Image (tube, helix red, strand yellow):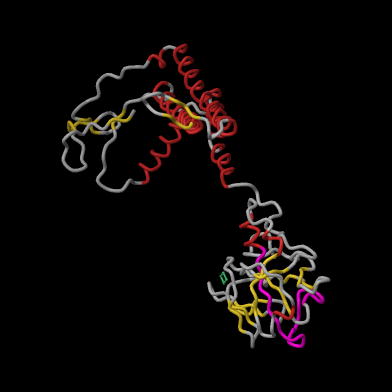
Amino acid sequence: MSTDLTPGSPGNLPATTGTADGAGREQPLYPLAPHQLRLTDTDPRAAKRAERQVATMFGLSALLIVAFVVAYVMVQTDQYLDLGNIGKFQLSNVLLGLTFGGAVFLIGAGAIHWAKKLMADEEMVDYRHPAATDDETRASLLEDFNDGLAESGFAQRRMVRRTLIGALALFPVPLVVLLRDLGPLPGTSLRETIWKAGERIVTDVTLRPIRPSDIPVGGLVNASPGSLEEVQHAEGNMNERAKAVIILVRMTPEQIKSQQGEGWDYNGILAFSKICTHVGCPIALYQHVTHHLLCPCHQSTFDLSDSGNVVFGPANRRLPQLPITVDDAGYLVASSDFHEPVGPSFWERG
Ligand code: FES
């Protein structure tokens, strides 16, 4: 324990007697009371008992972390704890709070108990200095630090050390477990849409099938998959709808410089994802003379006559093209799903 015996002294200077000890240090005006040894300093059995108490606290902390995980997985959110007049509480919240709070408390209590009962108990006088520490003092501090490290018993007291390491190692587990609340893993959902071969292309909102003759050269139509209506109320439909929306544009076949696949147009009608590959804004600002499609969010510009390539702006990936044809009834249909993921780029997209 370090004690500063300079009460009431002006400035940073210690109140001293004006006499020096054998090491040339001035003696404090208010000398230390005789040092009282702790029971753990004189009785090895008391020290062992304190060590076991510390280890128990660290061990219980580890168990509470395990209990936290079990409660998180096993207790449903519709289970409640009824405490009568006090109130009704969601059981999972109570258990998660108690287990995690208890684990934190026990690590702290164990560390304090360790410091108070087992670490070195020395009283000393620290003199204040009016200026920055000199090299000698810094060296002395370093020495003190190393002494403190040795005196803490971290190296010798294996049971305490191991249980503390165990408790601290499990400590981040709740943070990892809580990642589950971010929702299910996306799986292939970022790579696939509900487009498939033979899927009718219908107008967006009104869901009317489209014939090639409905689209004039220079025109643009917002469209969706025909089966979207069937899954309109199904879970995740909004995601499917958001991923599957397309635009149809028409130009003369001679104006098409390149496509993402051989013959993916139908008589100059091209289908592209409507979702910007930058951060996903819907795009429909079409300049039919240049065949450029402009995203209103950050001005990425795609050349639909040249494979939907980026000609300007922050998007770093072309707009995915949907291969199309017509069915027996003469309506526009998809030839397959997109051949590359739609929407914003992410770490696995080229
Ligand atoms: S979202 Fe289209 S340019 Fe940013």
Q: Which stretch is magenta?
A: 244-265
Q: Give ligand 1's quarter of the image.
A: bottom right
Query: Is residue 151 visible to the viewer in this orientation of the structure?
Result: no
* Residue 265 image position (x, y, % from top left): 77, 77
Q: Where does residue 305 sit, x and y in percent of width and height?
A: 70, 82
Which quarter of the figure has residue 86?
Answer: top left
Give residue 187's position: percent from left, percent from top. 69, 51
Which residue is at a point 56% across and 44% down the rendered structure image? 181
Q: Is residue 260 magenta?
A: yes
Residue 84 sits in which quadrant? Answer: top left
The x, y position of residue 136, in whole percent, is 37, 43
Please report the residue visible at 59 percent of the width from the left and 30 percent of the height from the top: 74
Q: Residue at x 70, y 63 (%)?
A: 341
**Figure quadrant of the N terminus:** top left
Left or right: where does residue 102 sit relative to residue 349? left
44 to 251, vertically: above or below? above
Q: Is residue 281 above or below residue 179?
A: below
Residue sitting at the far right: 328
Relative depth, front residue between 20 and 130: 130
Q: Say left or right for 130 vs 158.
A: left
Query: Where is 191 relative to 141, above or below?
Result: below
User: On the image, which quarter does residue 193 sit in?
Assistant: bottom right
Say which quadrant the C terminus sits in: bottom right
Q: Is residue 260 visible?
A: yes
Residue at (73% x, 65% y) in the render: 340
**In the foreground, 82 or 139:** 82
